[in-house]
Amino acid sequence: MLVSAKEMLTKAVAGKYAVGQFNINNLEWTKAVLLTAQENQSPVILGVSEGAGKYMCGYKTIVGMVNGMLEELGITVPVALHLDHGSYEGAKACIAAGFSSVMFDGSHYPIEENIAKTKELVAICEEKGLSIEAEVGSIGGEEDGVVGAGECADPKECKMIADLGVTMLAAGIGNIHGKYPANWAGLSFETLDAVQALTGDMPLVLHGGTGIPEEMIKKAISLGVAKINVNTECQLSFAAATRKYIEAGKDEQGKGFDPRKLLAPGFEAIKATVKEKMELFGSVNKA
Ligand code: 13P
């Protein structure tokens, strides 16, 4: 059964580790993340962007697929199904479809509007026992066509949003979605420290987990980050493994064109990446 992300994140804050959110794109992706979480006895959050939601034939299809897998694969570790960077309408649609967690990204609105919309969604989620993530300060890079500059959030605004009763808070600290450019200035620990000083035990979320050096990940966790989002890195691993298979001509040997064979190396590559991240984040054996 899907669970809210609240308990797993409260435990992560107390235990000084982070739970990974791995974005899913299809059946293979979902199965790879769930099996890796089970094998490593790690709690996990499946992330679904609105674009990926459309790609996978809508939120109801995803809920059906994930619930089916939890049962058929015998998954017993805590799993949350979470909308990533949701709009106000998207969040409502996911709640209706059976997601156990949503993110409302109101970071592009003026703070008053972000507060008003977040507050309404917090009330709905509270009533249904779902977890909700809010965002202050847009995360840089491109995601689903939305391009942000990688701002640093205003800690006072973070405190205002945290006080609305959200489960977790994404604060921009110079992080960027996708690959980091060579001249990236790194995470602003000064901002993170200031945000944590005002928000206390609130689980903080680090977006753009792909390509952040290990020491920075560890330092971020020590400063209250309890959820780390990873998307691009699994895509890169999947693509590289699939490329290798095809370049070696394996799709032309025997029945190598069978999708169950063709997609297998990419599937294993996602599993390896997810395992590596779970180890780095410290969530192994924390289920
Ligand atoms: P990356 O694609 O950089 O790993 O970021 C994922 C993310 O933050 C999803 O919200």
Image (cartoon, grey):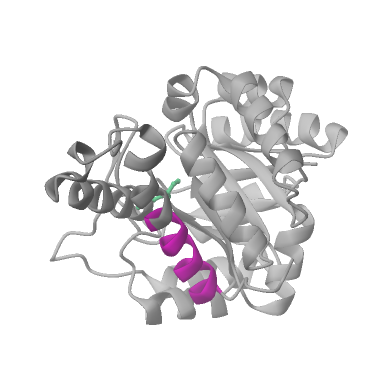
Residue drawn at x 13%, y 65% as measured from the top left: 182
Q: Main secondary structure of the magenta part?
A: helix
Magenta stretch holds residue 264: no
Magenta stretch holds residue 270: yes
Q: In terms of image quadrants, where is residue 252?
A: top left
Q: Nearer the viewer, residue 56 or 207?
A: 56
Q: Nearer the viewer, residue 238 or 79?
A: 238
Q: Residue 91: percent from the left, percent from the top? A: 62, 27
Residue drawn at x 60%, y 21% as measured from the top left: 61
Residue 160 sits above or below residue 175 on the image: above
Residue drawn at x 76%, y 53% as measured from the top left: 6
Residue drawn at x 68%, y 42% as measured from the top left: 132
Taking the image as shown, residue 146 lies to the left or right of residue 159, namely left
Taking the image as shown, residue 114 lies to the left or right of residue 94, namely left
Q: Residue 200: percent from the left, percent from the top? A: 69, 69
Residue 4 sits above or below residue 17 on the image: above
Q: Nearer the viewer, residue 79 or 9?
A: 79
Q: Nearer the viewer, residue 208 or 64?
A: 64
Quadrant, the N terminus: top right
Q: Residue 98: percent from the left, percent from the top? A: 73, 27
**Residue 212 visible (yes or no):** yes
Q: Residue 259: percent from the left, percent from the top? A: 37, 33
**Residue 208 visible (yes or no):** no
Quadrant, the C terminus: bottom right
Residue 256 sits above or below residue 179 on the image: above
Residue 95 sits above or below residue 5 on the image: above
Q: In terms of image quadrants, where is residue 145?
A: top left
Q: Which residues are magenta?
A: 269-281
